[in-house]
């Protein structure tokens, strides 16, 4: 008896995929957060002055995506109303139980605090100068602190620096941890790898840097402002370096699996050549990795005119974002397409308007951009001509 | 509902008669017996399955489904049929509807063929228990892996962590469901529905803490194996005459 969408033998309970496109969004979104924050820290901690125009933009991008990060998980749960139990009675041996704490730490201790300290002087100024509702919003955002004396700003800057220093390992923790959730599942050879956290981390940096680079260029275009090419070149250079490390790690994983050829290899190899051919080989490796790497390498090796360079950066950035999404897809969905018996394959039938369907997934991907627009309106990140107060 | 004096006398009379022949109130009402009759610490449950005894009739699957109201299309237990042509070729495996209706006749009789009943392995080191973010799935003191459906979030991390494909999301309850080793029966001194309905005795519920249980003799005198021993889950479902091709 044939089951539609199934080839070979699946354990009967395996036919239906348990983790949907929403779980693909979860590592993708947290990756963008971690990557954007690490880009911001380049300026703050490592004093890469060239990327300063994107410092605030990167922080707001990270916050917009971080606010959305738990939503796909929440929507996916069979009983979302019980999710608070993870905070009240966390099971200490569970990797997933730590999510809430890692998330809260990152949101409150790192990101909100850093943004508040960065914007505090402007918030106070706006609280005093705005009218009506805006005045009230900014007054709340001051948290009652109106002291913006040079001494107070020096303290802000010192604390902000410390927060960023803490924030870098926290960003590593946030996304390395997401990789661990998958990498520690010993029952699944597609996931089970000690390289998984580090691969997730570098791919997160790649996606976050690419996202900020594209957002910066698009914002400047929309605002009809000149793009700071020194900034764009520097971001692209960091994107290239990070991408090389990320690609090397992924290839190391591939070479290791192929050379080792354990029990699962034949099954996984067949899956990559059939069901995952389009999303893994074409989209992730070729279009999403090799093409952007070639474009970025080209800008490093050859002297290319500014206009063409911009186009190359944008193409590379856009393809990178698609490629990293494909990578998350291949990990989450690919990891459920083969049977743990290694004797068969199932298919993922994405629904459209159900709770875990395509429409909620698209809305969840658009939501961070809506939040980003509000944040940009509330806390303008544009700093043309301004010297950093540090 | 109005109860007349006559009805009252009739019900009272029946209770008196049943009680006089030794029936407990629980048996009359159908409720569970007092829990103090069963001491969890005295038991450590598991199962032994003899592959050579299984005829693939699917009685166990049907009995389990009836006993536990297993939703259609999901399985707390199922039976697989293996057909092996040559050792270096992948085996042909099938389990049509979990073997709820048995198997169609074999088309080839020159192949090595056998049936493998599957269920939760009630592992002592369960990966599913390890990963549950709220501890809704747990190993009971008597060695049964259970899910507290009033606590389960339905995140399905445990489904991913189970190497044997034994878990599923209950479509009506939205919580994870699996074999409970008929916990409601074994704590009353009964065997599981699958064991009780197996016509050949291929499945045997065993209590490792009971010194008189036949499991000790079987483990001493027979060659047994667990599924995927390299997963190091300390599975408590043992198989006699298990072929190396079984996954």
Image (tube, rainbow, N blue to C red):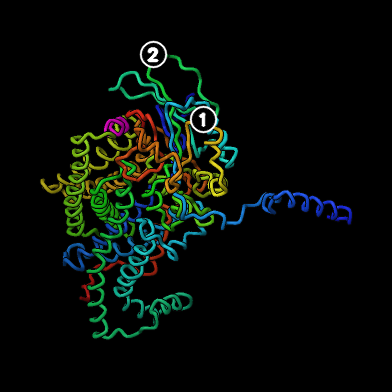
- Rendered position, B162 above or below B59: below
Nearest the viewer among B219 and A48 is: B219
Count of marks, rendered view: 2
Q: Which residue is mark 2?
A: B110
* Residue B222 pos. (x, y %): 36, 33
* Numbered badge on residue A145: none
What residue is at 32 percent from the left and 74 percent from the top?
Answer: A119
Q: Indicate the chain on which mark 1 is placed.
A: B
Q: Is residue A19 visible?
A: no
* Residue A170 pos. (x, y %): 27, 64
Nearest the viewer among B129 and B59 is: B59
Q: Indicate the chain on which mark 2 is placed.
A: B
- Rendered position, B78 above or below B153: above
* Residue B158 pos. (x, y %): 41, 48
Q: Quadrant of residue A268?
A: top left
What residue is at 21 percent from the left and 40 percent from the top?
Answer: A290
Nearest the viewer among A387 and A164 is: A164
Same chain letter for marks 1 and 2: yes
Assess disc 2: are there few (<14), some (14-19) or many (≥20) residues with their C-alpha within 10 Å of its C-alpha.
Answer: few
Nearest the viewer among A144 and A101 is: A101
The region drawn magenta spans: A265-271
Q: Is A355 left, or right, of B227 in this rendering?
A: right
- Residue A269, magenta (yes or no): yes
Does the magenta stretch mainly form a helix, a strand or a loop? Answer: helix
Q: Is B12 left, or right, of B177 in this rendering?
A: right
What residue is at 50 percent from the left and 31 percent from the top?
Answer: B201
Q: Which residue is mark 1?
A: B97
As helix, strand or loop, the secondary structure at mark 1 comes to: helix
- Residue A330, magenta (yes or no): no
Mark-to-mark CA distance, 1 and 2: 25 Å
Quadrant of the rendering where the C terminus of chain A is positioned? bottom left
Label 1 close to label 2 by CB (< 8 Å): no
């Amino acid at each position: 008896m044939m089951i539609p969408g199934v080839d070979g033998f699946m354990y009967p309970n395996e036919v239906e995929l348990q983790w949907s496109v929403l779980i693909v969004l979860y590592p993708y979104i947290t990756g963008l957060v971690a990557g954007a924050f690490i880009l911001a820290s380049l300026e703050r901690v490592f004093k890469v002055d060239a990327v300063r125009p994107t410092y605030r933009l990167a922080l707001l991008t990270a916050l917009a995506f971080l606010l959305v990060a738990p939503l796909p998980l929440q929507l996916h749960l069979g009983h979302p109303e019980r999710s608070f139990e993870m905070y009240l009675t966390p099971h200490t041996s569970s990797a997933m139980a730590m999510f809430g704490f890692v998330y809260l730490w990152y949101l409150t201790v790192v990101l909100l605090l850093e943004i508040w300290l960065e914007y505090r002087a402007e918030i106070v100024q706006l609280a005093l100068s705005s009218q009506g509702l805006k005045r009230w919003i900014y007054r709340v955002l001051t948290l009652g602190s109106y002291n913006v004396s040079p001494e107070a700003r020096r303290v802000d800057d010192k604390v902000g620096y410390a927060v960023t220093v803490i924030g870098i390992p926290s960003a590593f923790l946030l996304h390395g941890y997401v990789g661990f959730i998958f990498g520690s599942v010993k029952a699944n050879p597609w996931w089970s790898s000690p390289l998984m956290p580090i691969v997730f981390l570098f791919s997160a940096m790649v996606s976050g840097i690419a996202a900020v680079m594209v957002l910066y260029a698009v914002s400047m275009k929309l605002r009809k402002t000149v793009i700071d090419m020194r900034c764009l070149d520097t971001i692209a250079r960091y994107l290239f370096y990070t991408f090389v490390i990320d690609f090397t790690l992924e290839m190391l994983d591939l070479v290791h699996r192929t050379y080792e050829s354990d029990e699962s290899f034949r099954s996984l190899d067949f899956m990559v050549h059939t069901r995952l051919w389009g999303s893994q080989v074409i989209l992730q490796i070729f279009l999403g990795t090799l093409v952007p790497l070639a474009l970025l390498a080209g800008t490093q090796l050859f002297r290319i005119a500014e206009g063409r360079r911009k186009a190359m950066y944008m193409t590379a950035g856009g393809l990178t974002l698609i490629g990293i999404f494909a990578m998350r897809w291949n990990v989450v969905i690919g990891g459920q397409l083969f049977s743990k018996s290694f004797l068969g394959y199932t298919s993922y039938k994405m629904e459209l308007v159900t709770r875990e369907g395509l429409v909620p997934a698209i809305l969840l991907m658009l939501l961070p951009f809506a939040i980003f627009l509000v944040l940009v309106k509330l806390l303008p990140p544009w700093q043309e001509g301004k010297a950093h107060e540090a | 509902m109005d109860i007349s004096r006559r009805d009252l006398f009739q019900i009272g009379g029946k209770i008196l008669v049943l009680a006089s022949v030794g029936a407990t109130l629980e048996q009359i009402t159908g409720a569970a017996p007092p829990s103090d009759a069963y001491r969890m610490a005295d038991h450590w449950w598991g199962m032994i399955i003899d592959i050579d005894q299984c005829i693939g009739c699917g009685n166990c699957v049907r009995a389990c489904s009836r006993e536990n109201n297993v939703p259609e299309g999901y399985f707390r237990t199922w039976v697989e049929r293996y057909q092996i042509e040559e050792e270096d070729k992948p085996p042909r495996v099938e389990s049509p509807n979990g073997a709820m209706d048995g198997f169609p006749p074999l088309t080839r009789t020159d192949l090595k063929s056998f049936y493998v009943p599957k269920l939760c392995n009630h592992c002592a080191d369960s990966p599913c228990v390890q990963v549950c973010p709220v501890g809704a799935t747990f190993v009971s003191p008597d060695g049964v892996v259970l899910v507290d459906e009033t606590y389960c979030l339905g995140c399905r991390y445990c489904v991913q962590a189970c190497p044997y494909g034994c878990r599923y999301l209950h479509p009506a309850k939205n919580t994870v469901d699996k074999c409970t080793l008929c916990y409601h029966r074994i704590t009353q001194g009964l065997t599981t529905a699958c064991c009780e309905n197996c016509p050949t005795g291929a499945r045997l519920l065993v209590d490792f803490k009971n010194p008189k249980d036949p499991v000790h003799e079987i483990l001493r005198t027979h060659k047994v194996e667990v599924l995927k021993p390299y997963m190091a889950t300390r599975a408590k479902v043992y198989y006699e005459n298990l072929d190396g091709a079984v996954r």
